[in-house]
Image: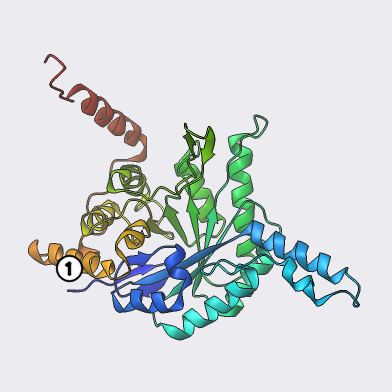
Amino acid sequence: MDLRTRYLGLSLRNPIIASASPLSGDVGVIRQMEDSGAGAVVLPSLFEEQIQQEERLAYELTSISADSSPEASSYFPAAVAHNPGPHGYLDLIARARAAVDMPVIASLNGTTVAGWVDYARLIEQAGATALELNIYRIAPGASVTGAEAEANCVALLKAVRSQVKFPIAVKLHPHFSAFGDFAQRLDHAGADGLVLFNRLYQPDIDLVRLSWSNDVSLSNPGEIRLGLLWLSLLAGRLPRVSLAAGTGVETSSEVIKYLLAGADAVMTASALLRHGPKHLRSLVSGLETWLSARGFASVSDIKGLMRLTHPEAETEAHERSNYIESLLTYQSPYVRQ
């Protein structure tokens, strides 16, 4: 069975990628991921705020007299083990590349061009196989238009693309006004791949403490449908760009569905946080078993098999027809038919 796929111009032994999470910040765990069948790994995101903080602290420390107490080193906050900040991040890349044979994809998360270009260049020099720009932008101000928010994202990609040669994927949330056009603009700006989708931070309210709750909610299989829709709409229409799915992958069923819709690669983080790195074995074996049972010889045989092939002018009408049908045919024991 041939499980190979191509993503960002890279050859992967299979389409299942361990996405950015605390797990991928540990080189020992990255080795386990490779041993368990991962096709590639995405390191935890380096946040723009971390870069800014390191630059600010460096300025403050260099402004202190040379006679000052050596306790000045304590001004730096304690590093999180899986995400040691900008300086440690470059070391993580180098150690991960030395430890495994699969592609090691770095991740930058932020909103502005400032500082990103230099770190993208440093990440490339540290040996990362590719870079994922995790664009997390919320425009809460009423004065910021959708066009401006999208233009800022495109400008960020162009700035990074102009300074590095290795492949760049752009990870996006789905809340853009005309996602198809935006995806095409990112293609023209130099993106080698798109990851669909980034999950926006969704806080909750604690009714006992009357405070905002910032806990992380892991994704579940019910969240794959928006990704399936947009993968099926974009697959085949952006021939130069790789497409990766990135939400709700719990079992091999979600992997297969995403591939059928047109994904070149499928990423998972929540399932690995729930079940551990060895869960990758279940995802890979489940994919292989399904292909074999249905007489498919390779992943390539099913990639995009279920993508929407209607002419672009007819696509909206087709999707609206499906929408109407789903509402009119819904059945409930409390609704009289």
Q: Is residue 38 visible?
A: yes
Q: Is residue 23 left or right of residue 282?
A: right
**Above or below: residue 96 compared with residue 182:** below
The amino acid beneath tag 1 is Glu
Rendering quarter of residue 5: bottom left
Rendering quarter of residue 102: bottom left
Task: Report the residue at 8% width, 63% height from top.
Answer: 293
Q: Is residue 190 left or right of residue 52?
A: left
Rendering quarter of residue 286: bottom left
Q: Is residue 244 left or right of residue 96?
A: left
**Above or below: residue 93 compared with residue 194:** below
Q: Position of residue 99 (x, y in %)?
A: 44, 84
Task: Report the residue at 47% width, 47% height from top.
Answer: 215
Depth check: give the residue in front, 239 or 270: 270
Task: Report the residue at 88% width, 74% height from top.
Answer: 68
Q: How is the image coloured?
A: rainbow
Q: Is residue 74 left or right of residue 181?
A: right
Q: Position of residue 128 (x, y in %)?
A: 52, 75
Depth check: give the residue in front, 251 or 4: 251
Q: Secondary structure at mark 1?
A: helix
Task: Report the residue at 38% width, 58% height from top.
Answer: 244
Q: Residue furthest bottom?
A: 98
Quadrant of image for the N terminus: bottom left
Q: Position of residue 177 (x, y in %)?
A: 50, 35
Q: Position of residue 71 (x, y in %)?
A: 78, 73
**Above or below: residue 93 compared with residue 44:** below
Q: Which residue is mark 1?
A: 288
Q: Is residue 115 visible?
A: no
Q: Residue furthest front?
A: 208
